[in-house]
């Protein structure tokens, strides 16, 4: 169900990357994901959990991104973090710094999304599904933002604000493919949870397809 | 055996007194023991009551703490459900923690919030609260006034080495403006993540210390914490002493024995102490209660007097009962004593009678002996005088006959005197038989010779039937006397022309000698009396004799360990039988002398 839901986004990203330039590099590989934690039955619906203060998705997903000195985008990108069936969709949303994220309410009830995270503190207040304009926030500080709903205590969402336009969320098996990357020396990073980010220096050449696995 | 006890009643009295004393002693001992036990029991009960009072106080405090605990658990559960609180704790926004929790804890901080009863409100009214982070350190509040102001030092003391797994009870001594001694009860509650169950923080609340109503008058209670005693009712000077003593006891591990006596102003006091927060990570605090022992002592004194009074009454009753009992128990003994006394008297009387009889007998025997001796001499003088007269020439034949008769009478008199003397010696038990073998056959022959020599006109025939050399154990002269007496009788009481038969035989180590005469038979009613003294039967006065012979012969036979009896007395004759012990003949050399 979730890969199916992610699929359009991946396709979109791939289409974007493919449309840029053929001379750009591609990295593909796999991130070894921690074993999925079986939550207690009553908590089965939590999809973002904190264990010992560490936030992660369940089942685990990773975000792989290319860290480097990239210019700020000309126009602020936008993204959407919907609330649907009392969950955040998607669970884990990587965005580039300066992205405006919209929070459409797709349920029949109120939501009150807020964050106390250092990267972004905000409180959207209570809003109905038909609230217009759709509440949104600009995330201009890199870091992990934990989204919560003041009304639905179990709702968690993660927005990973990154200083790079090159990022991708792995599938449930940890596989990823980053396309449209500029040649050069970079550090490829894999965010696994709020406390674990693996990294690997990479050198990209035009037209290369680099294979990088994170153990 | 024992002499009759002249002081018998006194002895019985002594016995009774001793019995009474013993019973009283036992009674006193039992009563005393009972009293001591009762007193101990009462004292122990009083101490136990005090201790129960202390425990009740503790329990009351515990109950209140339980109430608080239950309310706080619920509050914590509520708190942790707040997404903002979770966000503050988990998303690194501790500065937003207190504002997020403020609404939840508003009713805890405001005493009269809600429609609670005053007690509940009191129990739940916190003076301050703080959160502890994952390391157990206090998260500083952005606005201390909203959560109860504390000095930094006090705040530090709220910290724990690690987040607690369960609620922790502690005490916090705070400097107050007025009397400088204020104590707060502190409860640390873990805050568990509703998601994973792990403890993500803790909330520490400070309450006014519970002051339950005193269980008994004069009891002052407080808390010992960190070497200081927080007991406002006690003067500061005494508090230090008590605190030091408590510290010593707690440090020495004597906390199990959780009471001791201590001298304070106003007399001795009993102190109870018990760990107020067992198992807590906070500094150990001890609940302390001070009881003045003066009231207790007074009560015990009163009790002791009551017990003593009751005991005295009991003892008195016991003495009375002992007295009655002793009397009753002594009665059979008295009876016994009286009976034995009577017996003693009777025996004494009988013994005295016996004694006097014996003495009279002795006296009588002595008298006879003396009389006989006294008579012997005059009789001899008389006979000598008569014989001298008889020897004179100028006497007529008639005078000579008369004088001869008189001389003959003196011989009779001498014989009687001799017999009496012998009898009196036997009566006095002074006659001792000097046993020796005596040839009875010779003795009979000799006697028969004498008999034949007697001048009488009886013309008696003599038959003998005895073996030769028949020996008996006897003293010869007395054996001869017996024989002579019997033969004399046989001759005297025989009819003219009658016969005398003398027979002897040896049978079973005894020698039986029978002497039979053919005189008039003795009347059967007189046969029983013939051996009595001065009894002569129904014989005529012309028969010589004086009734001593048979008696003497029988007594002598008895002294020879033999007997003399009348075998028969009928028309065929009168037969006497005397028996002696048989004896071996003496050696030949001796026989020549005998």
Image (cartoon, coloured by chain):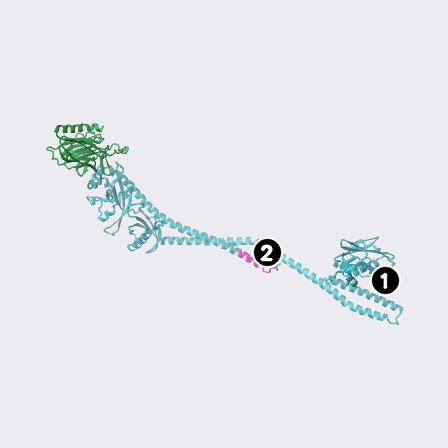
Which quadrant is the N terminus of chain A positioned in? Answer: top left
What's the distance in space between the residues labelled 2 and 1, CA to CA?
Answer: 73 Å
Which quadrant is the C terminus of chain A positioned in? Answer: top left
Q: Position of residue A54 (x, y in %)?
A: 22, 37
Secondary structure under the numbered disc 2 in the rendered image: helix
Disc 1: which residue: B453
Secondary structure under the numbered disc 1 in the rendered image: helix
Question: Which numbered tag is attached to residue B337?
Answer: 2
Q: Pick the residue in front: B323 or A100.
A: A100
Chain ID at mark 2: B
* Majority secondary structure of magenta residues: helix
> Closer to the N terminus: mark 2 or mark 1?
2
Q: Position of residue B528 (x, y in %)?
A: 77, 55
Question: Are labels 2 and 1 assigned to the same chain?
Answer: yes
Chain ID at mark 1: B
Q: Is residue B7 magenta?
A: yes
Q: Is residue B244 magenta?
A: no
Residue closest to the far left: A74
Above or below, comparing residue B366 to residue A209 in the picture? below
Region rendered in magenta: B3-18
Which chain's colour is green? A
Q: Position of residue B278 (x, y in %)?
A: 32, 46
Question: Which numbered tag is attached to residue B378?
Answer: none
């Amino acid at each position: 169900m979730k890969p199916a839901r992610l699929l359009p986004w991946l396709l979109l990203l791939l289409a974007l990357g493919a449309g840029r330039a053929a001379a750009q590099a591609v990295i593909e590989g796999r991130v070894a994901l921690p074993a999925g934690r079986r939550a207690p039955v009553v908590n089965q619906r939590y999809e973002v959990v904190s264990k010992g203060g560490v936030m992660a998705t369940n089942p685990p997903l990773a975000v792989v991104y290319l860290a480097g000195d990239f210019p700020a985008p000309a126009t602020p990108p936008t993204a959407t973090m919907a609330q649907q069936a009392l969950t955040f969709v998607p669970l884990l949303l990587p965005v580039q710094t300066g992205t405006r994220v919209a929070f459409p309410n797709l349920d029949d009830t109120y939501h009150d999304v807020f964050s106390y995270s250092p990267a972004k503190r905000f409180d959207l207040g209570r809003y109905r599904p038909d609230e217009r304009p759709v509440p949104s926030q600009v995330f201009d500080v890199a870091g992990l933002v934990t989204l919560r709903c003041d009304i639905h205590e179990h709702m968690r969402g993660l927005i990973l604000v990154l200083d790079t336009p090159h990022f991708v969320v792995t599938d449930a098996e940890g596989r990823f493919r980053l396309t449209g990357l500029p040649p050069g020396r970079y550090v490829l990073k894999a965010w696994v949870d709020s406390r674990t980010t693996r990294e690997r220096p990479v050198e990209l050449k035009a037209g290369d397809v680099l294979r990088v696995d994170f153990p | 055996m024992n002499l009759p006890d002249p002081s018998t009643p006194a002895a019985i009295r002594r016995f009774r007194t001793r019995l009474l004393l013993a019973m009283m002693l036992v009674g006193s001992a039992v009563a005393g023991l009972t009293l001591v036990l009762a007193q101990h029991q009462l004292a122990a009960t009083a101490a136990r009551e005090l201790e129960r009072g202390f425990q009740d106080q503790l329990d009351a405090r515990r109950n209140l703490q339980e109430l608080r605990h239950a309310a706080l658990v619920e509050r914590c559960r509520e708190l942790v459900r707040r997404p903002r609180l979770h966000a503050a704790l988990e998303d690194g926004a501790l500065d937003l923690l207190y504002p997020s929790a403020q609404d939840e804890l508003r009713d805890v901080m405001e005493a009269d919030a809600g429609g609670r009863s005053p007690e509940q409100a009191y129990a739940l009214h916190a003076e301050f609260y703080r959160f502890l982070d994952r390391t157990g350190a206090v998260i500083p509040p952005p606005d201390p006034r909203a959560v109860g102001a504390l000095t930094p030092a006090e705040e530090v003391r709220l910290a724990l080495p690690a987040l607690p797994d369960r609620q922790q009870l502690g005490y916090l001594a705070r400097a107050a403006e007025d009397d400088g001694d204020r104590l707060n009860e502190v409860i640390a509650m873990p805050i568990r993540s509703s998601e994973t169950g792990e403890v993500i923080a803790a909330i520490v609340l400070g309450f006014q210390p519970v002051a339950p109503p005193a269980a008994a008058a004069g009891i002052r209670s407080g808390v010992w914490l960190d070497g200081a005693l927080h007991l406002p009712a006690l003067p500061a000077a005494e508090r230090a002493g008590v605190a030091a003593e408590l510290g010593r006891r707690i440090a020495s591990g004597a906390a199990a024995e959780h009471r001791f006596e201590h001298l304070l102003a106003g007399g001795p006091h009993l102190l109870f102490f018990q760990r107020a927060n067992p198992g807590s990570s906070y500094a150990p605090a001890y609940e302390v209660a001070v009881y003045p022992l003066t009231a207790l002592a007074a009560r015990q004194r009163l009790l002791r007097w009551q017990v003593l009074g009751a005991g005295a009454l009991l003892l008195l009753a016991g003495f009375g009962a002992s007295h009655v009992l002793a009397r009753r128990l002594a009665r059979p003994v008295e009876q016994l004593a009286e009976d034995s006394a009577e017996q003693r008297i009777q025996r004494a009387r009988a013994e005295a009678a016996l004694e006097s009889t014996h003495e009279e007998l002795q006296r009588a025997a002595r008298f006879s002996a003396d009389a006989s001796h006294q008579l012997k001499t005059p009789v001899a003088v008389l006979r000598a005088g008569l014989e001298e007269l008889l020897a004179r020439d100028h006497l007529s034949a008639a005078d000579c006959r008369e004088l001869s008769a008189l001389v003959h009478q003196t011989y009779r008199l001498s014989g009687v005197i001799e017999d009496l003397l012998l009898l009196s010696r036997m009566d006095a038990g002074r006659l001792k038989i000097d046993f020796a073998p005596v040839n009875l056959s010779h003795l009979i022959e000799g006697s028969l010779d004498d008999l034949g020599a007697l001048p009488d006109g009886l013309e008696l025939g003599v038959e003998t039937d005895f073996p030769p050399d028949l020996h008996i154990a006897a003293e010869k002269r007395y054996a001869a006397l017996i024989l002579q007496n019997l033969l004399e009788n046989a001759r005297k009481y025989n009819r003219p022309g009658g016969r005398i038969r003398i027979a002897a035989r040896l049978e079973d180590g005894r020698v039986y000698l029978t002497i039979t005469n053919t005189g008039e038979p003795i009347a059967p009613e007189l046969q029983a009396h013939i051996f009595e003294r001065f009894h002569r039967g129904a014989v005529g006065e012309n028969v010589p004799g004086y009734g001593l012979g048979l008696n003497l012969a029988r007594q002598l036979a008895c002294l020879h360990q033999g007997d003399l009896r009348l075998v028969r007395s009928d028309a065929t004759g009168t037969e006497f039988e005397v028996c002696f012990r048989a004896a071996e003949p003496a050696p030949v050399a001796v026989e020549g002398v005998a």
